[in-house]
Amino acid sequence: MNFWQFKFNIQKGNWKEFETISSGEEFYQEITAYKRMEGSEGDIVFYYQTDKKYQVGIHFITEIISAPHKDESSTGYVIKLKVLRRLKQPFNDTNFLIYNRLQSKLKPMGQGASKYLLKDEDEGKKLFDFLMKGNVYNDIIQIDINSEIINDFNNIREEHIQQGFLFNPFHNLNLIRGEVKHLSFLGNLLNPMGNHFKGNVFLKHFINSLLGYIDLKDNKFLQKFTDKNPFIEIEKQIVLNNGDKARIDLWLENDEYIIAIEGKIEAKDSLGQLDKYNDYLNKSKKEFILLYLTLRKNEEPKNLNNSDLKESKKFHLINFEEDIIDFIDDSIKDNTITDNIQNTLIDYKDALLKYMYDYHLSFEYSLSLIDFITKSEFNFLESEKIKDIFFQNKNKYKNTVIEDIAQCFEYAKAYIERLFYVNLRDKAFENDYMLKDDSEVSLREDKTSIAKDLYKILKVRESRLQPKILHNSLIEFPFDLDGDFFFSIRSDYLGVFKNEIHINIDTLSLLEYGANKIEPDIFKSSYIINLLNKKYRESLILNFLEFN
């Protein structure tokens, strides 16, 4: 039996009708996805259907108070509902049984009053009373939160405050986004004459990060760069071959070699800018390399494919996500630097992670909250309530631990999904499968890798919000066994799949291919809590890998 049919009216007289939906969650997901695309306000008509005919409809006027924070399913929207009018016939006692079934469909929607008001044996009557009272808004409904868990979160927050982790000048001054100031900081760090008074220490770590690239590791000029009187200029002024003046962000030079760095964080390239720099450098009497520094891996200059630089051995792409973070990590570990410099670099790295991976808070603090949210099913459910409280009254809870929890909640879901992948990888290893190291999600346990992994997983989860639109976001973990069997875990806008590929190892010809969804909807927001159950998670992995 189908229970739901609904229509939208974004503009008066312009109704959009959807198919009848049997599941409350699917119904709600259609509403939120449609409203996200078309606008923030509009009318909804709910028709409740029995076997025989439409018994009643309720007309709500709605307003979205908040959208989900990169959420692929229904959880995350807070909607204000006002009963505008009741259609057809009024409710009476004979409809009470219908309403009991109605609330069972509303409950999985996981939103506001429908979730937290209805929790005892009088659920049906409460729902009946709630809907039949005109002019009732769900933001006046009280949501009961366990006081002990709020205390626990406050203790985590206070611990980070006492340790100074919530104060970071790089955050406060917005230095990461400010391209000129940001690159000036890096330039001073690389400068042997910088006010860190550590000589070539940081420059050596940076050069070593460049030598990690296959096509640069044999570069003899780089290998000896710090031995040949290096010096640094920030915003090096040059006169291009056409007579125009220009500035190169970072200019590293020694007796034999030039390293020119053009950094792009948010600014866009000027047309032909890099080609002009390359022409200028080619007229130098020294060997050189031109580096293009971007925020993330695989970003490249506009129109690079139309440039000779694409194939040039004197041009190379580097990025903050890997190269600069690795360089900073190595510098932090260097026991020759002072505690003050080390703490500055730790703050700088945290600010980079926060900016690159869209964390609302310091990553160290965020990770502590995420750990606690995902510690148990109870913690997760209580945190979800706290998140809903915040989005119903953002001004009241701004800059409190309530906001901190709300801003971390979607990352906590990504953390649970990542936990599944980690456990699956470990079980595969036990059965002699090897994970190929070419996934954007590394599953390594250092904090930098976790920050990056959660962001990548979250981007894929976000792409599932509108499943009818094609998305490029995906994650894939490829495994092989003795070279003759290959399978992968693939997560994309449609869900999470196991791809099986059987090949003939002698001819490398494809024999068989198959893709199977791990389990319907298991990674959706409303169901992901199930993966916190260790036995359930392990059972799912065994069935998935067929090792049991």
Image (cartoon, rainbow, N blue to C red):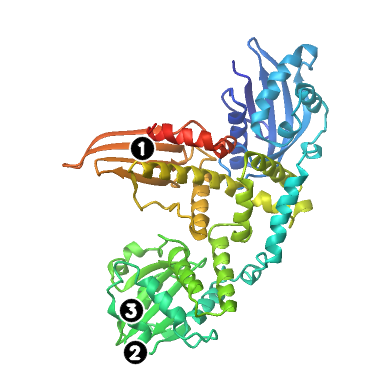
Q: Quadrant of the C terminus?
A: top left
Task: Name which residue lies at 62% across and 23% down.
Answer: 5
- Determine the CA span between mark 1 and mark 3: 43 Å
Kindly identify the amino acid type of the residue bearing the numbered disc 3. Leu
Q: Distance between the residues labelled 1 and 2?
A: 54 Å
**Residue 480, position in %: x, y?**
30, 44
At label 2, the amino acid type is: Asp
Q: Nearer the viewer, residue 142 or 422?
A: 422
Q: Quadrant of residue 203?
A: bottom left
Q: Are marks 1 and 2 in contact (CB under 8 Å)?
A: no
Dot label at residue 255? 2
Q: Give the Cα separation between the discs numbered 3 and 2.
A: 12 Å
Is the residue under label 3 in contact with that under label 1 (CB below 8 Å)? no
Specify few, some or many for label 1: CA neighbours under 10 Å numbering under 14, 14-19, or 20 or more: some
Q: Residue 499's mark?
A: 1
Q: Is mark 2 on a helix, strand or loop?
A: loop
